[in-house]
Amino acid sequence: MSGGLFITLEGGDGVGKSTQAAHLEEWLTARGRTVLRTREPGGTDAGVEIREIVLHHRGDIAPRAEALLYAADRAHHIATVVRPALARGEVVVQDRYIDSSVAYQGAGRVLDAQQIRDLSLWAAEGLLPDLTILLDLDEDAARARLDTSRTRYDRLEAERSDFHARVRAAYLELAAGEPERFLVVDAARSVEEIAAEIRDRLAARV
């Protein structure tokens, strides 16, 4: 049995993470791998409740409280879902992880990025992905892709353009600092072109 593999997808809202996660799951399954597709926040029953608070609560949440809520979701999710799947030799394809907290709560909320990273690593007991796929796109172009017909309020999507610009800059800085872990993909290209680049990077590992 092949060993477990932990793959995360990162990027701003509207870059196409869910679409690429679905393509990746289909490709991996066709290659005979068992895939667990999950997300943060909301990858567990408890996480669904935390997701409702951090994304859909109308009203202020103090930035440090928000960071702690994400960390609580992460601690439970990694311990009860991700680590068991990796131990079974599965491929975990996850929408958002530690880098999201560093980008959104660190840069976006202007908190100390290193403290946010340390908190997340503590919550996850040090687990880092084998590969992080960063779908990079100009923040205004990404937000223009969002489904405007949705009626649910999203606290992060509602933030101003300068917030999302800080998030994107933070992601690119993270990728530059860990080039062996990150695959930075131009998300302005077609869905199939992006999927093909991801498959090429992973082909030798799965």
Image (cartoon, rainbow, N blue to C red):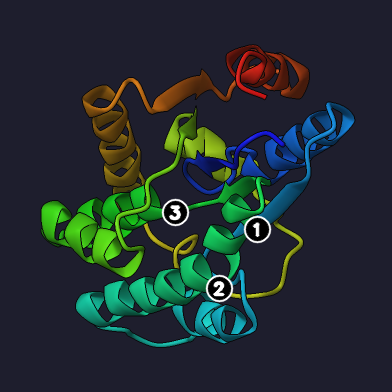
Residue 69 image-quadrant placement: bottom left
Q: In which quarter of the image is the C terminus?
A: top right
Q: Please state which of residues 28 and 49 is positioned toward the viewer in this rendering.
A: 28
Residue 138: image x %, image y %?
45, 30
Category of crowding for the residue at label 3, using alpha-carbon neighbours closer than 10 angstroms: few (below 14), some (14–19), many (at least 20): many
Residue 12: image x %, image y %?
47, 44
Q: Which of marks 3 and 1 is nearer the N terminus?
A: 1
Relative to residue 77, is residue 151 drawn left or right?
right
Decide: is 99 above or below 118: above
Q: Please state which of residues 20 and 181 is positioned toward the viewer in this rendering.
A: 181
Residue 156 image-quadrant placement: bottom left
Relative to residue 35, is residue 17 drawn left or right?
left
Residue drawn at (47%, 41%) of the image: 11
Residue 151: image x %, image y %?
71, 73
| Residue ID for mark 1 | 38
Category of crowding for the residue at label 2, using alpha-carbon neighbours closer than 10 angstroms: few (below 14), some (14–19), many (at least 20): few
| Residue ID for mark 2 | 80
Residue 194: image x %, image y %?
66, 20
Q: Nearer the viewer, mark 3 or mark 2?
A: 2
| Residue ID for mark 3 | 97
Q: What residue type is labelled 1?
A: Thr
Q: Report if the CB atoms under discs 3 and 2 are less than 8 Å apart.
A: no
